[in-house]
Amino acid sequence: MQPDAYNQDGLISVHNHEFMQEPRFTAAYQRGVAAAGQDYHWHWRVHIGLWAAQTAVRLPGDFVECGVNRGFLSSSIMQRLDWDALGRQFYLLDTFRGVDPRYLSDDDRREGVVEKNAGWIEQGFYATESDSVRRNFAEWRNVTIVEGAIPETLSRVTAARIAFLHIDMNCAAPEVAALEYFWPRLQVGAPVLLDDYAFHGYRHQKVAMDALAERLGVAIASLPTGQGLLIRT
């Protein structure tokens, strides 16, 4: 029996959320908690991420995450999919230093990205080195960790075909650059998940992604989890 209401991570819902008790979801979610070192109560957000990954695995191609931090979602996905059995590569891109200030626009700064970034580093939410992240992913063989700022590091993703793309960088310019760069290699039907798309305090990222989506001829679904979801057409 599920609780009466889901109330966490900015989302309140009385709709069915029995997925939280499903054993495979629980195991995947707990692997994400182990990666992060704490539970951020992101159950519904991770549920969407796992759905996208399970959809993507039906397509040819590798997986890419831009904005890994400590690896909560990507670890959950790899646990859920039994990653090494798939014979695919998971490219994990991050500065492992928080947001690179060189790519902040005036709008980002007005929305408080500088202050948020400093706060998350001080609180220990952001990884500030890659060694611990590399140890977290050491249990899987087919992982490529790419350290550095986007867009500078995008060319280090050598996948010819991409089936899944997750973007979570809390900064508009690198997020737009990543989607533009990978778009030609995304397989038709591939899900693209935008972590901050509809989050309060990140409207500049939404506006920038909406403009890119219009140029690409696709639509982004705004989800009550704060995520955005689009499908490569």
Image: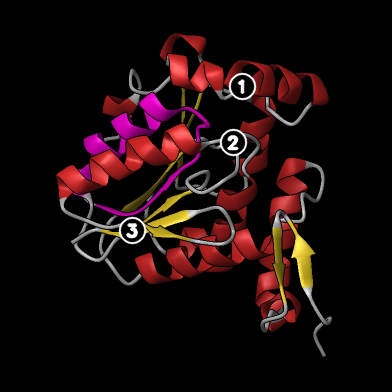
Question: Residue at (61%, 21%) from the top-left corner?
Answer: 112
Residue 42 place in picture, x, y as percent: 70, 56
As helix, strand or loop, the secondary structure at mark 3 comes to strand
Return the mark for residue 112: 1
List the residue tagged with mark 3. Answer: 230
The amino acid sitting under disc 1 is: Gly
Q: Earlier in the sequence, mark 1 or mark 2?
A: 1
| Amino acid type, label 2 | Gly
Residue lying farthest to the bottom in this orientation: 1
Image point (67%, 40%), residue name = 136
Crowd class of label 3 (few under 14; some 14 to 19; many from 20; radius 10 Å): some
Per the model, the C-alpha gap separating discs 1 and 2 is: 8 Å
Residue mark closest to the camera, 1 vs 3: 1
> Label 2 belongs to which residue?
201
Q: Quadrant of the N terminus?
A: bottom right
Type of amino acid under label 3: Leu
Q: Position of residue 192 (x, y in %)?
A: 36, 54
Q: Residue at x 70, y 16 (%)?
A: 118
Numbered disc 1: secondary structure: loop
**Magenta segment:** 162-185
Task: Tell me the CA gap for discs 3 and 2.
Answer: 21 Å
Label disc, if present, on residue 173 of the rendered structure: none
